Amino acid sequence: SPAIEDLKQCLENTGQHSKLIDSFISALRYRLLTAGASTNDILHQYISTIKALCRIDPTGVFLEAVSEPIRDYLRGRKDTIKCIVNMLTDGTGGGTNGSGGAGDSLLEELNRNVDNLEISDHDNDFNSDDKQAWADAQ
């Protein structure tokens, strides 16, 4: 989307990576990671977040930084596994609109992550210092 491309270009020009990470995590905790949000909605937003952040930062460093709070929160919810299984097996993708997109998107992301893990097994030069360097870049 044009907004994602604009954000990517702004980050390249301003170097405000760490500010964006902090703001994004703060917004997640305040708006999404609450008892009032359904696990299914959180998972749908997580999938959308993965897609958007992979366009902003193909290396995945930004995604790793901002997805940790989501993953931690989902681990604490009792219905997370059930919702994931429903998204993968239900023809509607676990959503109410009948599009089937969320389950397909989740499966696509899971498969992509497996492929990335296989690639990263061959190249383990990336460490947590690189994450901080990216956040502090430019």
Image: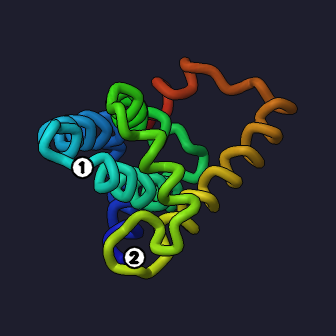
Please indicate whether residue 21 sits to the left or right of residue 55 in the image: left
Mark 2 belongs to which amino acid? Ser
Disc 2 to disc 1, C-alpha distance: 26 Å
Tell me the number on the disc at residue 20. none
Q: Residue at x 51, y 28 (%)?
A: 131
Q: Residue at x 37, y 68 (%)?
A: 95
Please indicate whether residue 112 sits to the left or right of residue 11 in the image: right
Q: Residues within 10 Å of mark 2 (few under 14, many from 20)?
A: few
- Which of labels 2 and 1 is toward the front? 1
Q: Quadrant of the C terminus?
A: top left
Number of labels in the image equals 2
Secondary structure type for disc 1: loop
Tell me the number on the disc at residue 1. 2
Mark 1 belongs to which amino acid? Ser
Q: Residue at x 28, y 43 (%)?
A: 20
Can see residue 76? yes
Residue 40 screen position, x and y as percent: 34, 53
Residue 24 screen position, x and y as percent: 25, 43
Can see residue 11? no
Residue 77 screen position, x and y as percent: 33, 32
Please indicate whether residue 100 sits to the left or right of residue 96 in the image: right
Q: Residues within 10 Å of mark 1 (few under 14, many from 20)?
A: some
Observer-nearest of 44 and 6: 44
Please indicate whether residue 94 sits to the left or right of residue 73 in the image: right
Secondary structure type for disc 2: loop
Point out the tag, 2 or 1, that comes first from the N-terminus.
2
Residue 23 screen position, x and y as percent: 21, 40
Asked if labels 1 and 2 touch by Cβ distance under 8 angstroms, the answer is: no
Q: Residue furthest right?
A: 122
Observer-nearest of 112 and 85: 85
Residue pointed to by mark 1: 38
